[in-house]
Structures are given as C-alpha cells and as structure tokens.
Image (cartoon, helix red, strand yellow):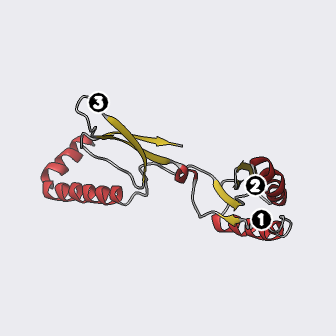
Amino acid sequence: MVNRLIAFAIEQRYLIILLAALMVGLGLRSAANLPIDAVPDVTNVQVQINTEASALAPFEMEKLITFPIELAMTGLPDVTEIRSLSKFGLSQVTVVFKDGVDTYFARQLVLERLQDASQHLPEGLGTHPEMGPISTGLGEIYQFVLEKTDAQDKGAQAMFAVHRSEAPHTTTDSHHLYLAPCG
C-alpha cells in the first residue's frame, strides 16, 4: 500500500507539487485571517457610571451619590459584581455582568436604572451621572514614559521627567529610558 502511494507520488510529481503549493497557499491565507489580538481581551462586560460633584468630600460622595446609584443597580439580571470608588468630587460605580451578556443590552439595563436613580440624587450640586464609554478593563491601563532632560550644569546629574504617553511609545533614542504600563 505504502509502496504504491510512493510510486504514484513519484509518477505524478507535478500534481503532488501543485497540491502541496495549494495547501501552503490556503494555510497562509487562513493564518493571515485569524482573529487573534496581540493582547487578547479576556475581561468581562462592564458598564461604568461616573458622577462629578466638585464640592463633595469622599465620605459625602459615598453617602449622597455612590450608595444610591449602587442601590439602584442591585437586582439587574446577570450582574456578578457591583463595585465603586468615591474620591474628592468623583463617584465611579462599575457594574460587572456575566460572560456572554451583550454589551449594548447591559448598557440599556444600566441606563434605565440610572434614569430612575438620578431623580433621587441631591439637587443643587450639579450632579448628573453619566455612563462611561464602551471600553474594557484593558482600557484602564496607562502608559508612562521616563525621559532624560538635559541638565543646565555639566556637573549636575541628569534629571528625569515622567509624563503620560498618549499612545504606545517606542524609541531607540537614548533620552527615552523606560516605558512602564501602570494600572
């Protein structure tokens, strides 16, 4: 059986070469069309609610704004977690849904509850809760660049400046020393 297969491949070598080239071409085409990211997004479906009230301390933000919004979000279907962050003048509530929930459906559910919750927030503070943009947990990573600045005095040590990078930043320049993702 194997001998006959080898004999056929030798006799029909142009056909075998053509079939091998066709298989290589199909393989390269399939590899080029694979939907693979460099950093796959494995985060769950999240909807963020941001509220600004510049006159309130963190305790007041938690009591007057964050807690009522969290309370309004309880009972939503397919919610796995509700977490919040209260800072000076900022309340951020994140509603996390189960895997497989459509992002737009989750945002619609949150928006319906948010409209009701905004009516129960204190008036006169300029508070209006807003949903954050459609993003994932990977969008929360900041990139910082550490740059060497030229010192005025030749005898002084080199000074460094840290600033937020607006885009992924790569360089071979000797002035850019470090790129660090910080979350």
The image shows residue 4 at horizontal and vertical percentages of 22, 46
Relative to the observer, which residue lies in front, 34 or 64? 64
Tell me which numbered mark, 1 or 2, is placed earlier along the sequence. 2
Which numbered dot is residue 156? Answer: 3
Query: Which quadrant would the C terminus be assigned to in this image?
Result: top right
Q: Mark 1 points at which residue?
A: 125
Is there any visible trace of residue 100 in the rendered image?
Answer: no
The image shows residue 45 at horizontal and vertical percentages of 64, 56
Tell me which numbered mark, 2 or 3, is placed earlier along the sequence. 2
Which numbered dot is residue 134? Answer: none
**Horizontal arrangement in the rendering, residue 105 relative to residue 43 (left or right):** right
- Determine the CA span between mark 1 and mark 2: 9 Å
The image shows residue 64 at horizontal and vertical percentages of 83, 56
**Horizontal arrangement in the rendering, residue 124 relative to residue 28 (left or right):** right
Relative to the observer, which residue lies in front, 105 or 50? 50
Mark 2 vs mark 3, foreground winner is 3
Relative to 128, say whether 95 is above or below.
above
Amino acid, disc 2: Leu
Q: Mark 2 points at which residue?
A: 56
Label 1–label 2 contact, CB within 8 A = yes
Amino acid, disc 1: Leu
